[in-house]
Every structure is written in C-alpha cells, then in structure tokens.
Amino acid sequence: MAKSRTLFICHQCGYEAPQYFGRCPGCQAWNSLVEQVVAPGPAGRPTLAKPTGAAAQPRQALRLGQVAEQLGQRQSTGYPEFDRVLGGGLVPGSLVLVGGDAGIGKSTLLLQTAHRLVEHCAVLYVCAEESAGQVKLRAQRLAVASPECWERLYLLPETNLEAVLMELEALRPAVAVIDSIQALYYPGLTSAPGSVAQVRECTAALMRLAKQSQITLLLVGHITKEGAIAGPKVLEHLVDTVLHFEGDTFASHRLLRSGKNRFGASHELGIFEMTGTGLEEVSDPSTLFLSHREAPAPGVATLVACEGTRPLVVEVQALVSPTSYSTPRRAATGVDYNRLVQILAVLEKHLGVPLSRLDSYVAVAGGLQVGEPAADLGVALAVLASFRNRVVDPQTVVIGEIGLGGQVRPVQQLELRLREAAKLGFRRAIVPPGESIPPLGLEVIPVTKLLPALCAALPDSVEESVAE
Ligand code: TYD
Ligand code: MG
C-alpha cells in the first residue's frame, strides 16, 4: 500500500507546497500554509486522508420534503435561553461551536447543559483539558447536578482524536461535548495540538462522524488574543452554528450570542448569570442594564437596543467636561468609538454645542456592547443632557439613528422595542417618524430632526443649547 505523505496547503489560496514556507509562494500571504496529510487516491491522485472510524457509506439523494422532516425534531437543551440562541434547540447531527475567553464559563455551561440533556438521551462529555475527577468536582458544585444524572452522563478524559472517534462510534450518544477542540490531536499529523492543521483535521473528522451517525456535537473553542476563534477561519465554515460566550470581567452576567447559524437567526442573544452554584438563566434581562431610576442623574438617557429579536432596555451615561488638553479626550465604553465621534461632530455642527473644546465620556451601564445605529439618539441626548446638566425624564426611552445632516432616521423592529419599553412601565418614547405604531400604552413622539428630539427630551434647555 502506498504511503501517505505530508503537504503544506495555503488556507488563503489553496497553493500546495511540499515544504513549509513562511510566506505563500502563490498569494504572498504570511503564515498561511497549514500541514495536511494526503493519501494516494485510486487513480494516483492524492486525496485527503480519511480518519479511522468514519466508514464511507454510499449516499442517496433525498427529496426536500424528507430533509425538512429530519430537521423538524429539535432537541431542547433544557435551557430556554440556550434554545433561543440555537434557533429552537439542537438539530440532530449538527455541529455547534461555543467560543469564548478562558474562564468565562464554557465548560460550566456545557456541563450544566449535559446534565439537563441526560434526562432525555445519552450524553458523552469528552474532557480533553481536565481529568474526570475535576469534572466531577465541578458537577458537585452545580445546583443542577443530581446523582441520577451522574449515572447517565459518560465522561471520557482523552485527547487522542482516534480514541474519541472510536468511543463515539461504540457508545453512539445522541449528544457529545468536546471540551475543547484545541486540546484534541490527530496522531497522523506531526504538528502540536491546537495548531491550525490539528484543529482543522479534528473538526473535519468529527463532522464526518456526526453527520453519518446523527450525533449532535457541542465543541468548545478557545479565543485568540484578537478575539477570533483559534484555528483557521475554515473551522467556522465547517460547523453549523458558531456561538460566542462573552461577559464582562467585573460583571456576573454572561451573554451567549449566535454568530453563524445554519438552523436559525444569527445575532440571537441568551443571557445567563454566573453564581456560586453555576450559571442561571436571566429571563428579564432589561433590569440588569438599568441603574436606579428612582434617583435620576444628569447625562443619562434610556434606549432600547435590539440583539437579534431580543429587545433590551439599557441606559447610556455621558459626561461632558472642559478639556485641559489641546485635543479633547473621547472615551466610549459599550458604544462604537467612531460612531460617538460622528455624533459629537453632528451635535457641534447642527446644534452649535462646542464639543470640540470639551472632553466626552460615554458608557453603557452593565457592560453591554451596543453596536447598532439605533442607539445614536440616546447617546446624543445623554451628551446634551450632561452638557446642560439636565435630567432626561426617566420615564422616556429614546430610539433612532442620526444622519450626518442631523436628521433622525428609521430603525428596524421599532414596534418590538416599544413593546419592551411599555412592558417595563416607560410612559414616553421619542422615535423616528414614518412607522404607524398600534397603541401600546405609552406616548409615542415621532421626531424628524435633532432639535425636536431635544425639545421633547429636555424642554427647558433648548434655548441655551441652540446657537443658531
Ligand atoms: P469554566 O467553565 O471553567 O470556564 P472556561 O471553560 O470557559 O474556561 O468557568 C470558570 C469560572 O467560572 C471560574 O473562574 C469560576 C467560575 N465559576 C463560578 O463562579 N461558579 C461556579 O459554580 C463554577 C462551576 C464556576
Ligand atoms: Mg473549560
């Protein structure tokens, strides 16, 4: 039998080289060559080596109607917040990658999920980073752990991919957790575990088995310094769903977001709280991001952000003070810096507020990141309120994007946002014009420009603010 050999393939352009180059001779990209083992194919053409355990089966074409029936039976994770991010539960045979910083709680989330899942099906937890004893210690700390669950949850402390594949084939669990994909290694490759080639090969082999045997795989992925999931981009292409588990180092809440989802909407959000006994779901998250509304402070505006289909009422706080430098300082926490600079420029140009001589600090309460333009009007009114040392009515929410000409532009899902505000007891909403909203129990004030928005939010400070 002909021997398999090693090739180096550029993951940017596909160039194949017999040896490693720091720079790809094909596309000139740096560090893009990855090691790949190839076995000679039947016609002498090299084909990628198949990992052991994944037996090739002849496939038949399916009618679309049949495929839809297969996807219909989703498996609930036992956590409505997790199900929401997945688009309604786990699809059998799918690969879900959960990425996040070290220590954020990925292992805790998946161990708790495994505990809920074993009530309905067999689960294998491959702990490639920890010993079985360590996992059991953690299980004892978690509120959900019950001795009956321990009998039905299988642990495999193993890092060798071939052993993991063999155990998966022998046990045939409905769901398997791989913690983590970077700790697994394929013995056919000489590169170290966690390297690009290893991560790619291990994921591809697991995917083949998952699809053939209808095993749902939950993979833990580490995050690099730059915030991407470690391993080549191809890893994110291989899996069906990419979830990011994130949180503030100083806050106890954790956000589970869907980046890519073949079986549901992307950018969905699930919210958990890390407690002494594991993760708990937060079903009413808006209260997390609102500080004390009983004692209103100047320079605070309330806005309704939308994460996927989930509206979140959050507070944006601004502080504007005279600068002691030739260039004013601008700091943005939780909002996009460039967006803030743009809003400040619009306020200076169209309302005559001398912000180029003032330091501006803007922060979103609770450590949430609000990236969408619908937050613009909230940021602008918080800055103006701080400039005038005025309080925006704490019963008012502000929604809208600001154009460069000072106009208030429409936002998506306005009705959904207003429903959430009404549910939380807000009485007024300053919104972009154009959309007809059914009565929701709160006064809706459509505004076309910044000035009417300012009149509605801070009526007594308009004359002072407007230089024109
Ligand atoms: P872990 O799930 O090990 O993180 P990851 O797998 O993402 O690296 O969680 C680690 C952190 O969670 C650790 O710093 C302690 C904290 N934690 C709690 O606060 N409460 C708990 O019940 C558990 C199990 C962990
Ligand atoms: Mg872990």
Image: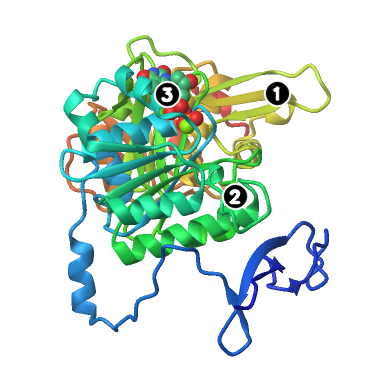
Residue 134: mark in rendering: 3
Which residue is at 57% across, 52% downward?
199
Residue 358: mark in rendering: 1
Question: 244 or 266, which is in the foreground?
Answer: 244
Which residue is at 45% across, 50% downward?
163
Quickly name the residue at label 2: 404
Question: 348 or 201, which is in the foreground?
Answer: 201
Amino acid on which the number 1 mark rests in the picture = Leu
* Rendered location of residue 55, percent (x, y): 39, 70
* Quarter of the image where one finds residue 12: bottom right
Question: 27 or 213, which is in the foreground?
Answer: 213
Which residue is at 34% across, 47% downward?
176
* Rendered location of residue 417, percent (x, y): 30, 41
State which mark lies toward you, 3 or 2: 3
Badge 3 density bin: few <14, some 14–19, many ≥20, Cα 10 Å:
few
Of the numbered discs 1 and 3, the one sitting upstream in the chain is 3
Q: CA separation, marks 3 and 2?
A: 56 Å
* Quarter of the image where one finds residue 29: bottom right
- Residue projecting furthest to the bottom: 43
Image quadrant holding the C terminus, namely top right
Instruction: Name the element at disc 2.
Output: loop
Amino acid on which the number 2 mark rests in the picture = Leu
Amino acid on which the number 3 mark rests in the picture = Gln
Question: 346 or 91, which is in the foreground?
Answer: 91
Which residue is at 53% across, 15% downward?
389
* Rendered location of residue 214, percent (x, y): 28, 61
Q: CA separation, marks 1 and 3?
A: 53 Å
Compared across the picture, whether 244 is left or right of 216 comes to: right
Q: Are marks 3 and 2 in contact (CB under 8 Å)?
A: no
Badge 1 density bin: few <14, some 14–19, many ≥20, Cα 10 Å:
many
Of the numbered discs 3 and 2, the one sitting upstream in the chain is 3
